[in-house]
Amino acid sequence: MSRTVLKLFVAGRSLQSERAIRNLRSICREALEEDLEVVIIDVLEHPNEAEVSRICASPTLLRELPPPVRRVIGDLSDAGDVIAGLGLHTSRA
Amino acid sequence: MWADANGQELANRFKDAPVKKKLTGIQGFDLITEGGLPLNRTTLVVGTAGSAKTVFAVQFLVSGIEQCDEPGVFVTFEERPADICTNFASLGWRIEDWVKEKKWAFVDASPAPEQMTVSGPFDFGGLMAQLERAIRKVGAKRVAIDSLGAAFAQYPQNAIVRHEIFRIANALRELGVTSVMTAERQEEYGEISRHGVEEFVADNVVILRNILEDEKRRRTVEALKFRGTSHHKGEYPFTVSAEEGIVVIPLSAIELKQKSTIIRRPSGNAELDKMCGGGIFRDSIILVTGATGCGKTLMTTEFISGGARAGERCLLLAFEESRDQLFRNASGWGVDFAQFERDGLLKVMCAYPESKGLEDHLIQIKKTIQEFKPERLAVDSLSALERVSTTKGYREFVVALTSFVKHLEVASLFTATTPTLVGGTSVTEAHISTITDSIILLRYVEMLGDMRRGIMVLKMRGSAHDKNIREFTIDGEGMHIGKSFTNITGILAGFPHTVPADEAARIERLFRNGQMDPAEM
């Protein structure tokens, strides 16, 4: 199975950022992908990363691999939307 | 004139204002805003589609770099940075080079190509981080954000976008940069902007309009509000020229502070000089009005020839006849334009009125005057330009042109064609009669089945002049002014009729010594 890379861009340690990280964790627990890598990037510390990936909204979650790139913005509070947006496989129906 | 005042002069003029401003460097705009945009604030620039918002935003940064050596950051929600570089290269703006020289930085907030899902609330933290980084990277003093409408289109959560824009505006103030944000509007005269952004973003609003009037497009700019500081009210025309981008024509910002001279110069016709009390003033503006074919072009030719013979540099702007026609006409009256040109004393510029908009004509005329530096200017005819513009636009053009030449002390002669053969007035007369120093009327006079020509000096500021209506004839040597029409009345009204000689004598006696003789009444 191919490698899946998710990058979560947050802006500082705000409540919104914490929420997004927590929501992403629980989504990852559901995911069936075997080789799943998650990177969390704080754009306040690494603004160049935001530039390269063209991050305006935060939090933004990018599925960098496998192609094509998928983008989800928001605090990821609707797991169903996030899973669909990212095209992940889960045990859900 | 104000329009040509340099930045330093303007800055001094407004340095005591409570809210400091930053000169934009956009020609004319700094005048109507009395010194530019409020310093370290955000100004909202709104306009309909095609109203040159993006040009304004880009030019705000360009003139910062070119004129004030101030780097800038451009945030684009709409076009890709590469497209912006390409689109504005034709204006001679080397944005790509400036990016390399770290004078210009882009923040690319245009829609990402990939599919995007929204799940829950978000903010513009990523954009802010990029913006701050870009500002620090180039040491920006100016930021342009184009456009808010595109930001709203990208993120359907309007409330969030609105709040975030508000946050960005505040952050920009903290960072000590002066910024513009562009926003769409749907109607030229209606609510300020489409998403109601003006209510939460900007204390300062500039409106760009692109109005369709009588099938002609007319661009205007209005400083609607600048909180805590003054500015000129109302709409001012502007044009987007291929060389300089936006050029605002600051009409009422022009000051009446012309100097005055008593030096007289030959008008080109000795008899006319006599009528004018010894020649025309060196800095005066003369309006010659008359019906078609009654000698306006001849007067123009003599005016030019009089100047050139006295060693003055003359500029002739012709909007009715071609160069060949002008030269042929002149030689028909014994004037050799070609020789004057070879001597460097004459420059002839012919243009078809419809070839461009009035604002562009004005810019070109000003440019030619600044380059050639004439001491004498003739425009034949000014009224030909009437048809390419709206009445309002034409009036503004005339005011801008006359005040410009007045300031440079260029002796100017403008001709205007009256719509009727005898008598009559023209729009031009109505617009510039108060600005001109002299008005000369050329009129057809119908007498006993003959069409004859009459000339009259109606007004001559600062000088005594002949008040008679004199007859003149035209031959191979030009214009010959003769005796006054005696015993004729009603020429100006267009209904000349003969007065018997004894009646004229009686009237003459009536007013003798400034008092009436009761016995005659």
Image (tube, helix red, strand yellow):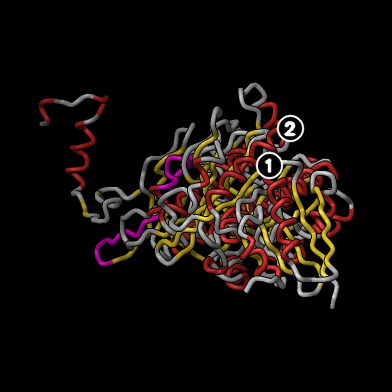
Locate residue B411, reporting x and y percent: 59, 44
Mark 1 or mark 2, whichever is nearer to me: 1
Mark 1 to mark 2 CA distance (whole Å): 49 Å
Q: Are marks 1 and 2 on the same chain?
A: no
Please, what secondary structure does the residue beneath circle 1 have?
helix
Q: Residue at x 52, y 46 (%)?
A: B197
Residue B418: image quadrant is: bottom left
Locate residue A79, reporting x and y percent: 64, 61
Location of mark 1 (residue)? A15
What count of labels does the image hold? 2
Q: Residue A35 carries which label?
A: none
Q: Mark 1 lies on which chain?
A: A
Tag 1: Cα neighbours inside 10 Å, few (<14), some, or many (≥20)? few
Which of the pair B503/B30 is nearer the observer? B30
Q: Is residue B52 visible?
A: yes
**What span is colored magenta in the figure?**
B431-449
Location of mark 2 (residue)? B8
Which amino acid type is shown beneath numbered disc 2? Gln
Q: Mark 2 lies on which chain?
A: B
Tell me if residue B483 is in the magenta stretch.
Answer: no
